[in-house]
Amino acid sequence: MQFLDRLALILVVIGALNWGSIGIFGFDVVAWIFGGQLAAISRIIYTIVGLAGIWCISLLFREHSLVEDRIDH
């Protein structure tokens, strides 16, 4: 589970940076790299980042954080 948590957090950070780029510069990095917002690979990446965001919601409701788990083990 810890691997999925970390992967999801990395993907959410990537998504946040992309949204920051859109908000500040009006530039969509994912679309630029993969051929536009409607390109199949861009849509797949947007979907994966969205699923990672949904996964990260579960982090809000867990009793222990990743840091506490590391200290305990």
Image (tube, rainbow, N blue to C red):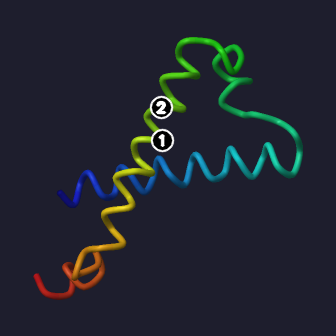
Percent across and percent down for residue 35 are 69, 14
Disc assigned to residue 47: 2
Q: Secondary structure at mark 2?
A: helix
Q: CA distance from mark 2 to mark 1?
A: 5 Å
Residue carrying label 1: 50
Q: Is residue 7 above or below residue 27?
A: below
Q: Is residue 44 above or below residue 59?
A: above
Q: Residue furthest right?
A: 25
Disc assigned to residue 23: none
Q: Nearer the viewer, residue 29 or 52?
A: 52
Q: Residue at x 68, y 23 (%)?
A: 33
Q: Residue at x 29, y 78 (%)?
A: 65
The answer to whether 8 appears left or right of 61 in the picture is right
Report the label total.
2
Label 1 near label 2: C-beta < 8 Å?
Answer: yes
Identify the amino acid type marked 2: Thr
Percent across and percent down for residue 43 are 55, 22
In what quadrant of the picture does the C terminus appear?
Answer: bottom left
- Specify the quadrant of the image occupied by residue 42: top right
Percent across and percent down for residue 37 are 69, 21
The answer to whether 3 appears left or right of 19 in the picture is left
Residue density around tag 1, few if under 14, some if 14–19, many if 20 or more, within 10 Å = some
Q: Residue at x 58, y 46 (%)?
A: 15
In what quadrant of the picture does the N terminus appear?
Answer: bottom left
The answer to whether 9 appears left or right of 61 in the picture is right
Q: Secondary structure at mark 1?
A: helix
The answer to whether 9 appears left or right of 25 in the picture is left
Identify the amino acid type marked 1: Gly
- Specify the quadrant of the image occupied by residue 67: bottom left
Residue density around tag 2, few if under 14, some if 14–19, many if 20 or more, within 10 Å = few
